[in-house]
């Protein structure tokens, strides 16, 4: 695959790369148990307690050595059947692949080392929280949060920082194309920073996108994502040359270029109802008031973007 513009992939971990949740496996088997975990999850859903507060209780319920927990995890976890091939595709095409997670970095790293091998795993940057393991019996695991927020990890900030660093590294000033892959509504803070959004089919993120008319690509496995990225990269490179005029990119390619420009609003944000923008994207909702976002009209022309009817 040939593309001059840098493509960067960000992906959630639990439920996206792996079908199961690493934390849930640990809590159910060694910690608070599935019943209490479901009660705590409901407290987050109801808004009674913050994600960070509940997570500290869940992780604090673990008092086992990490090795014991990993023995169970590696047996219980199921990796997406096409993820290894997709990661190899990214490696072969110089596409940085990053994990953005609300989980614990040492846990995720150990899982990737096991399923991918240490060499391939080492090329994946993991942006997640850290952890302090118990020094003696009876003490629980203690998360070390990446950010001082109610979520513990501001995924949107992490993507913003990566985009800025990648832009600065491009000598020609080209703005990178940001791809985000996820499965749940909790991925929206990071997804809002992306130019291209992939949502695992049949899970909560896709349901949210359908309900609120957010443009996205559905996927069943990472093979679907690879196919679309190849198509997007090809469209971004195809151009027709006029007499002495700058190259003109086709509408689909222009859509991604405009959506990733510093002044434009990502297409899937533009298609979100105003009241939802105020909740999920408050910092740009006011900016968009009365302004027609670039790329919105072009997005409607693309048959590959899923924007379900109401």
Image (spheres, rainbow, N blue to C red):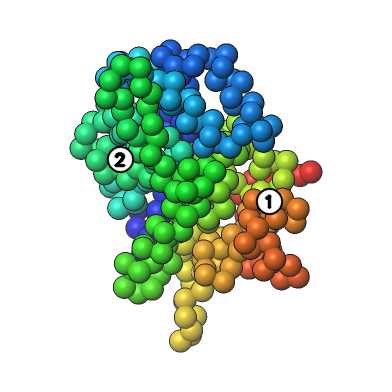
Q: Is residue 234 left or right of residue 199?
A: left
Question: What residue appears at the point 79 percent right and 43 percent down from the top-left corner?
Answer: 310
Q: Determine which of the numbered discs, if any, sits on residue 235 in the image.
A: none
Label 2 and label 1: CA atoms lie apart by: 37 Å
Judging depth in this view, the residue of 3 and 74 nearest the camera is 74
Give the answer, above or below, for where 242 lies relative to 214.
below
Residue 88: which disc?
2
**Which residue is farthest left?**
119
Lateral position of residue 299 relative to residue 16, left or right: right
2 or 1: mark nearer the eye: 1
Residue 270 is at least partly visible in this image: yes
Q: Residue furthest bottom?
A: 244
Secondary-structure class at tag 1: helix
Labelled pair 2, 1 in contact (Cβ < 8 Å): no
Q: Is residue 217 above or below residue 18?
A: below
Q: What residue lies at 65% left-to-right and 58% top-to-bottom? A: 282
Residue at image mark 1:
279
Residue 156 coordinates in the image, percent (x, y): 50, 52
Please tell me which of labels 2 and 1 falls first in the chain.
2
User: In the displayed structure, would residue 93 be above or below residue 88?
Assistant: below
Q: Is residue 11 visible?
A: no
Q: Is residue 234 left or right of residue 53?
A: left
């Amino acid at each position: 695959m040939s593309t001059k513009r840098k493509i960067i992939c960000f992906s959630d971990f639990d439920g996206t790369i792996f079908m199961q949740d690493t934390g849930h496996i640990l809590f159910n088997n060694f910690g608070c148990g599935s019943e209490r975990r479901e009660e705590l999850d409901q407290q987050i859903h109801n808004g009674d307690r913050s994600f960070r507060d509940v997570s500290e209780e869940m992780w604090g319920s673990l008092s086992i050595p990490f090795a014991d927990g990993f023995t169970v995890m590696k047996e219980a976890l199921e990796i997406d059947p096409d993820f290894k091939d997709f990661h190899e595709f990214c490696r072969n095409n110089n596409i940085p692949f990053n994990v953005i997670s609300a989980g614990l970095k040492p846990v995720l790293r150990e899982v990737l080392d096991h399923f991918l091998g240490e060499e391939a795993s080492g090329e994946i940057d993991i942006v997640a929280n850290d952890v302090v393991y118990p020094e003696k019996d009876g003490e629980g695991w203690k998360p070390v949060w990446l950010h001082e927020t109610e979520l513990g990890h501001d995924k949107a900030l992490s993507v913003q920082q990566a985009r800025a660093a990648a832009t600065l590294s491009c000598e020609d000033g080209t703005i990178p194309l940001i791809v985000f892959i996820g499965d749940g509504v909790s991925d929206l803070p990071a997804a809002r920073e992306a130019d291209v959004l992939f949502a695992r089919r049949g899970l909560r993120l896709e349901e949210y996108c359908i309900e609120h008319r957010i443009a996205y690509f559905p996927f069943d496995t990472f093979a679907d994502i690879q196919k679309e990225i190849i198509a997007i990269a090809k469209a971004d490179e195809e151009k027709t040359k006029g007499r002495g005029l700058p190259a003109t990119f086709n509408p689909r390619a222009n859509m991604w270029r405009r959506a990733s420009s510093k002044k434009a609003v990502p297409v899937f944000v533009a298609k979100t109802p105003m009241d939802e923008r105020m909740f999920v994207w408050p910092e740009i909702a006011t900016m968009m008031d009365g302004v027609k976002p670039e790329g919105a009209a072009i997005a409607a022309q693309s048959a590959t973007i899923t924007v379900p009817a109401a």
